[in-house]
Amino acid sequence: MSERGRPRSFDRASALRRAMEVFWAKGYEGASLSDLTAAMGINSPSLYAAFGSKEALFLEATDLYTRSEGTDIWSTLEEAPTARLAIEGFLTQTARAYSQTDRPQGCLIALGALHQDSTQGLICQDLRRRRAENQTALERRLERAAAEGELPADFDCQAAATFFATVQHGMSIQARDGATHAALMATVAGAMAAWTTMAGANT
């Protein structure tokens, strides 16, 4: 029988999730093909047949990560009734998500690949785009609060979004280095003190 006609002998969705966890733990460059195939339970030819390349596998894994991990972070940002609660909830959910012990710590989007070179230019571009989209989500939430009169007219939504996105990225690095949930929550407390300075004590 032709190989082309045979169904795959593995669960592609499960294999992709396991690959995502390897990339999450080790980053794009740190995850070797042997790491990936061992975790996915397949050989190299099957990986290439199913996903095309390591690069394509990583891009698909980051799509899965975006859809399935840390969704409470972004739903809290949108659903909180005030901008202050939105930012506080965003950071609190970040601390919870990044410090869970049953999965890699930190954020794949923040830590997966930071330095562009000839072998992973597309990877870095994709992650940079995703980080920018996250920062834009913060900025839009703050702009909504400003338009509703909750924030001062001169509130700098772009600068505030940049600041809180930077705090979140720092929390990702802290978590990867072993910071506990309590330690991350101390960072949240500091960031909310900065919010009071930026937005005023009554917001």
Image: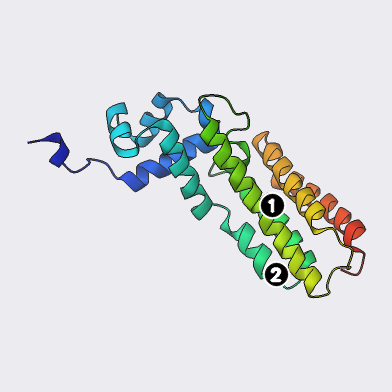
Q: Can see residue 105? A: no
Q: Secondary structure at mark 2?
A: loop
Give the colour scheme of this rendering. Answer: rainbow
Q: Position of residue 115 (x, y in %)?
A: 62, 28
**Quarter location, residue 80:** bottom right
Q: Which mark is residue 12?
A: none
7 sits to left or right of 158: left
Query: Can you tell which of label 2 and label 1 is closer to the viewer?
Result: 1
- Residue matched to label 2: 80
164 sits to left or right of 11: right
Instruction: Please tell me which of labels 2 and 1 falls first in the chain.
Output: 2
Amino acid marked by disc 1:
Gln
Q: At 32% across and 32% down in the image, what residue appears?
A: 48
Outermost residue, bottom side: 148
Q: Position of residue 192 (x, y in %)?
A: 83, 56
Identify which residue, 148 or 111, lies in the foreground: 148
Identify which residue, 31 or 161, lies in the foreground: 161
**Quarter location, residue 19:** top left
Q: Position of residue 96 (x, y in %)?
A: 65, 52
Q: Residues within 10 Å of mark 2 (few under 14, many from 20)?
A: some
Outermost residue, left side: 1
Q: Residues within 10 Å of mark 1 (few under 14, many from 20)?
A: some
Q: At 13% across and 41% down in the image, what residue appears?
A: 5
Q: Position of residue 181 (x, y in %)?
A: 70, 47
Tally of marks = 2
- Residue matched to label 1: 135
Q: At 60% across and 45% down in the image, what residue appears?
A: 129
Amino acid marked by disc 2:
Ala
Q: Can see residue 128? A: yes
